[in-house]
Image (cartoon, rainbow, N blue to C red):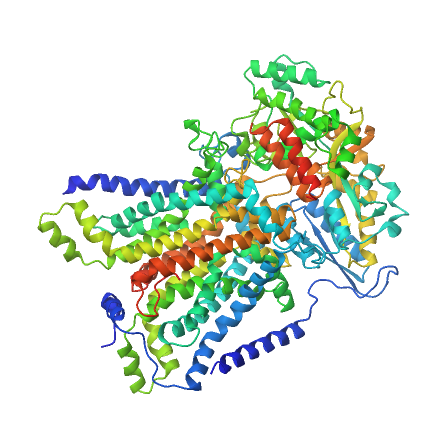
């Protein structure tokens, strides 16, 4: 009697297996060519996932792919363009199922390390050794795990303070502050003049993390940060002091209204506030002006009123001149990618394409000699600072393993909300790091 | 009597206003640009920007996505409702060993959101060779739509008197005949209800299509809206315009189905 | 006499007093038929809901970042960790608050609106349409629009309240938006229940001198019993799984002030890459929901059950 049910289920299961057998396990690109010998002539498909989902960069990438395909008729490049968050979600699931794309957006650091440990990205040290030296070494380093290269950078930016010159003048500030003490004094001047000193989009958590990270770099120093990345010593005195300096700033209440609910982008965000002259300063990366422009009626952003200065030095801190905070973008190579993929990436970061990409104003190219493609004066200033920097600390939520990076973001947000002390923040992060994330 | 009514009318229209204001905000927002919205959050469009709606409607992408959404919603509903109706029929009108266990099994799907199981679902879809296809999206949507549909349909199907089934049997109508020729036709209102619910759920799904679909040509509308955000920015006005346009088809379905919808939940099912 | 559409009320009442259909034919033929009817739904469901669920339960016993093989078995550690984590406890508390508010605020409101729309108010068809409209919208649209409206200079900006940034307010703000979206669904359910109550009963009571609120308390409310019980069930299940809307509006923040269990799960699974842990929390969530559902069916909905028939909801 129950047999008939069992029979039905068995039939269904058999049907499912049959479909699975016919459907085939490989849906995405599984190339039969083994890495090592580029098989010229044999048709090859490359799956490329990137996040430049708006023009002009989207078109630059597409044209680059078209050009490459023309020059290599046996290669087909399938481009999947995704928005940033959607990309992360889709990549995660694909990775977890063992299906990495061949070329994909990567920010390097801890996430790349986890992927490398799980053998989901390819060691391309050998295929790139002949030309990787033509790229900015700080950028290249971000895509290394140990001594092995797993990806190639195409953008390296810097985080600094974008400021509104007109508002500074109004408050009686002649020149950007060079030291932290000057900075805090300027914040007070702005407040006294009735101007909101700083815009921060703390809903997203990472804008606040930028402040803590920069202060940690200046106070605790880059070696302490590297050490903490290894052994979780985020509760060492340098970090606690950095937190205390940040608390000093937060206690001055220099942020815009409802900053805990404001995201970075868009009309309601940090960018929107700066765009409508609602605040004088914004600690942000090189993508900031574009977003300011988008949020002003005439699309010109702050125009000539926009200025930039690097994060001030903190007196008595372990940080040195030339150490900066930033990060970039690059392409990681998936573990199943054919050799042609590496070749294509080489083409993408070559000066020819890099100049076009740089000219879009959205990235700062990393190929040596392409700096001239950047024409905007503020971007040039960022580029110069980058050129002079001796060390670049990668965004903390990328540099460390994802769970630790998120713990940093969370802990700093509690500091901004006035719900934790600098000591708490340091301990919380240390705990997360030590428990393996 | 009429004077007593005034506060009631006021209350009703106050609630209506609370619903209309956000909707109007979204629609009007599409006629401004992001700069306007940033500078002046509650102003009227000035100038009126036609390009947001215009560009979206002119772009092939929007119509492709619309088509994909319609296709997948139709497939999903077309699977959910018949399968669930068949299952609800036997739950409602037959006794068999383990019936309540099976029923409880089906209600498990109500108790957790699909996002939690997305990885195993992805692997299963991949195993079935359906990655990148509309069925790859429609099948999981249908699977997760079964619980609520069965739960709604069962009491309704159970409410038909046995005499009806007996009479049909005398006329030579077996289980299938009764189902097809009597039960279903008489259940139109509640079937319209569950179809509407399944359709709306599928229409608004985001994570599942994102994970399953590989080619942007196969994208649905909720995925399309992500085109207006980037790693570092968000075009607020375009997002509003796009989401307004995407909700129009859903609202049109709803307006047509509303008559059936209210009746569907009304007749029998809920009273129990 | 075959039932017609308008006779549905009679139909229902008739159905209530009849035993469920008993078998006439015994033997394999009947079971084969049942199996055939059940099979499509069952197969689809087993493949795409039950099997994935088992996988999630399996993951919950491991420490796993989602990449690479499952090799770090930790047994119940993930569960212990979740239950002792302040953030998770906070999220659980928030879910409980949302349940409480839903029952105390959202449902009575929906009932009130349903009664309004059920009465002889002019324009009630249009109102009915309007009130259900938010349910049809996607959560993303709702969240985007409300985020815009609730910013400091937004529509309610004049009141100078930090709706989304103030940690003591943000959960309640989210609750209001959730109510905005879902009250129409409950309204429809109550409307259905109300339409089953014969007007004669209410009118008779009024003629006998009862006041309106007495009519409500002693006639309407009791007769609405089954309906209310179903509405409560769906509301609690929904409140336990709150995710989409809050995720887009606040991400669970600021500082976890609007965190819910489902947000916690997705955050740990997708953002922090601690998939085993996230799965364990998902299992906890499932167990809570299941226990509630089973208890509710056994003790509350039993009153509305006859024989082996169950009403809407488990």
Q: Which residue is nearer to you in this view: C257 or C125?
A: C257
Residue C7: image location, x then y, percent: 23, 68
Q: Is residue C250 visible?
A: yes
* Residue A35: quadrant of the picture: bottom right
Q: Residue furthest left?
A: C208
In the drawing, does residue A328 fall left or right of residue B41?
A: right
The residue drawn where x is 78% and y is 35% is A226
* Residue A109: quadrant of the picture: top right
Residue B66: image location, x then y, percent: 52, 57
Residue A235: image location, x then y, percent: 70, 31
The residue drawn where x is 62% and y is 21% is A249
Q: Which residue is nearer to you in this view: B30 or C90?
A: C90
In the drawing, does residue C302 fall left or right of residue A99?
A: left
In the drawing, does residue A188 fall left or right of residue C169?
A: right
* Quarter of the image that includes the C terminus of chain A: top right
Residue A296: image location, x then y, percent: 57, 31
Q: Is residue B258 visible?
A: no
Q: Residue furthest top?
A: A172
Q: Which residue is nearer to you in this view: C215 or A429?
A: A429
The residue drawn where x is 30% and y is 62% is C304
């Amino acid at each position: 009697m129950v047999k008939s049910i069992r029979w039905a289920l068995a039939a269904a299961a058999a049907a499912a297996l049959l479909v699975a057998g016919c459907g085939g396990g490989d849906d995405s690109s599984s190339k039969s060519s083994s890495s090592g010998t580029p098989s010229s002539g044999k048709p090859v498909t490359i799956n490329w996932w990137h996040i430049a989902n708006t023009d002009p960069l989207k078109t630059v990438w597409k044209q680059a792919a078209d050009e490459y395909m023309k020059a290599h008729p046996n290669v087909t490049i399938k481009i999947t363009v995704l928005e940033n968050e959607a990309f992360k979600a889709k990549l995660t699931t694909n990775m977890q199922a063992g299906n990495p794309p061949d070329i994909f957006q990567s920010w390097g650091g801890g996430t790349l390390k986890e992927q490398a440990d799980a053998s989901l990205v390819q060691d391309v040290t050998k295929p790139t050794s002949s030309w990787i030296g033509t790229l900015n070494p700080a950028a290249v380093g971000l895509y290394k795990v140990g001594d092995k290269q797993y990806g190639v950078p195409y953008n390296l930016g810097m985080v600094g303070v974008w400021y509104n010159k007109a508002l500074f003048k109004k408050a009686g500030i002649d020149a950007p502050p060079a030291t932290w003490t000057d900075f805090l004094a300027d914040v007070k001047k702005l407040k006294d003049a009735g101007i909101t000193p700083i815009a921060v989009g703390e809903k997203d958590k990472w804008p606040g993390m930028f402040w803590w990270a920069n202060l940690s770099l200046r106070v605790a120093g880059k070696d302490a940060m590297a050490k903490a990345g290894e052994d979780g010593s985020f509760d060492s005195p340098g970090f606690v002091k950095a937190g205390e300096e940040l608390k000093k700033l937060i206690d001055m209440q220099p942020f815009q209204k409802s900053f805990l609910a404001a995201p970075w982008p868009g009309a309601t965000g940090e960018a929107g506030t700066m765009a409508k002259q609602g605040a004088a300063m914004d600690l942000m990366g090189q993508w900031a002006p574009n977003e300011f422009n988008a949020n002003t009626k005439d699309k010109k952003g702050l125009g000539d009123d926009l200025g930039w200065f690097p994060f001030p030095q903190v007196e008595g801190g372990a940080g040195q001149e030339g150490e900066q905070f930033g990060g970039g973008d690059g392409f990681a190579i998936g573990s199943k990618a054919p050799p042609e993929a590496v070749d294509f990436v080489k083409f993408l970061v070559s000066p020819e394409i890099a100049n076009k990409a740089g000219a879009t104003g959205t990235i700062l190219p990393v190929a040596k000699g392409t700096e001239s493609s950047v024409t905007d004066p503020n971007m040039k200033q960022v580029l110069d600072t980058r050129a002079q920097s001796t060390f670049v600390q990668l965004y903390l939520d990328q540099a460390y393993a994802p769970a630790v990076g998120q713990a940093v973001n969370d802990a700093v947000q509690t500091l901004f909300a006035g719900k934790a002390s600098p000591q708490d923040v340091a301990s919380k992060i240390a705990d997360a790091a030590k428990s393996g994330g | 009597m009429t004077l007593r009514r005034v506060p009631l009318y006021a209350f009703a229209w106050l609630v209506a206003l609370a619903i209309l204001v956000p909707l109007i905000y979204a629609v009007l927002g599409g006629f401004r640009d992001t700069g306007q919205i940033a500078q002046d959050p509650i102003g009227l469009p000035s100038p009126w920007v036609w390009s947001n709606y215009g560009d979206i409607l002119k772009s092939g992408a929007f119509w492709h996505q619309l088509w994909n959404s319609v296709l997948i919603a139709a497939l999903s509903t077309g699977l959910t409702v018949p399968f669930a109706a068949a299952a609800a029929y036997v739950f409602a009108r037959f006794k068999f060993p383990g019936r309540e266990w099976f029923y409880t099994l089906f209600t498990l799907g109500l108790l957790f959101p699909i996002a939690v199981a997305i990885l195993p679902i992805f692997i299963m879809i991949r195993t079935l060779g359906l990655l990148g296809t509309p069925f790859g999206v429609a099948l999981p949507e249908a699977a997760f739509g079964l619980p609520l549909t069965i739960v709604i349909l069962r009491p309704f199907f159970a409410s038909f008197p046995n005499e009806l089934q007996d009479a049909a049997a005398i006329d030579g109508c077996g289980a299938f005949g009764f189902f097809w020729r009597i039960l279903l036709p008489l259940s139109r209102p509640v079937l319209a209800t569950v179809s509407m619910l399944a359709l709306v759920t599928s229409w608004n799904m985001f994570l599942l299509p994102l994970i399953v679909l590989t080619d942007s040509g196969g994208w649905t509308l909720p995925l399309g809206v992500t085109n207006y955000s980037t790693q570092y920015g968000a075009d607020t006005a375009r997002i509003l315009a796009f989401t307004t346009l995407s909700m129009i088809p859903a609202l049109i379905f709803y307006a047509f189905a509303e008559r059936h919808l209210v009746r569907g939940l009304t007749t029998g099912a809920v009273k129990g | 006499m075959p039932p017609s559409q308008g006779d549905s009320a009679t139909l229902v009442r008739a159905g209530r007093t009849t035993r469920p259909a008993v078998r006439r034919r015994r033997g394999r033929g009947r079971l084969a038929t049942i199996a055939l009817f059940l099979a499509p739904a069952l197969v689809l469901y087993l493949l795409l809901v039950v099997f994935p669920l088992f996988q999630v339960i399996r993951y919950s016993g491991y420490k796993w970042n989602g990449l690479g093989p499952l090799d770090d078995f930790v047994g119940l550690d993930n569960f212990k960790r979740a239950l002792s984590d302040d953030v998770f406890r906070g999220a659980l508390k928030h879910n409980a608050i949302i349940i409480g508010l839903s029952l105390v605020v959202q449902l009575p409101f929906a009932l009130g609106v349903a009664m309004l729309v059920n009465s002889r108010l002019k324009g009630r068809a249009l109102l009915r349409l309007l009130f259900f409209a938010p349910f049809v919208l996607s959560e993303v649209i709702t969240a985007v629009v409300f985020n815009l409206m609730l910013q400091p200079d937004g529509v309610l900006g004049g009141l100078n309240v930090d709706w989304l940034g103030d940690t003591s307010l943000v959960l309640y703000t989210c609750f209001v938006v959730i109510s905005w979206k879902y009250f129409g669904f409950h309204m429809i359910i109550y409307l259905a229940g109300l339409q089953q109550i014969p007007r004669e009963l209410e009118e008779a009571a009024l003629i006998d001198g009862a006041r309106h609120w007495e009519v409500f308390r002693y006639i309407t409310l009791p007769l609405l019993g089954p309906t209310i019980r179903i509405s409560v069930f769906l509301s609690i299940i929904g409140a336990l799984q709150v995710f989409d809307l809050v995720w887009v509006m606040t991400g669970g923040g600021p500082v976890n002030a609007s965190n819910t269990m489902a947000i916690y799960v997705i955050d740990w699974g997708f953002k922090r890459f601690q998939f085993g842990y996230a799965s364990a929390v998902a299992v906890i969530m499932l167990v809570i929901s299941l226990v509630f559902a089973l208890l509710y069916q056994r003790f509350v909905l039993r009153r509305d059950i006859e024989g082996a028939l169950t009403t809407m909801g488990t």
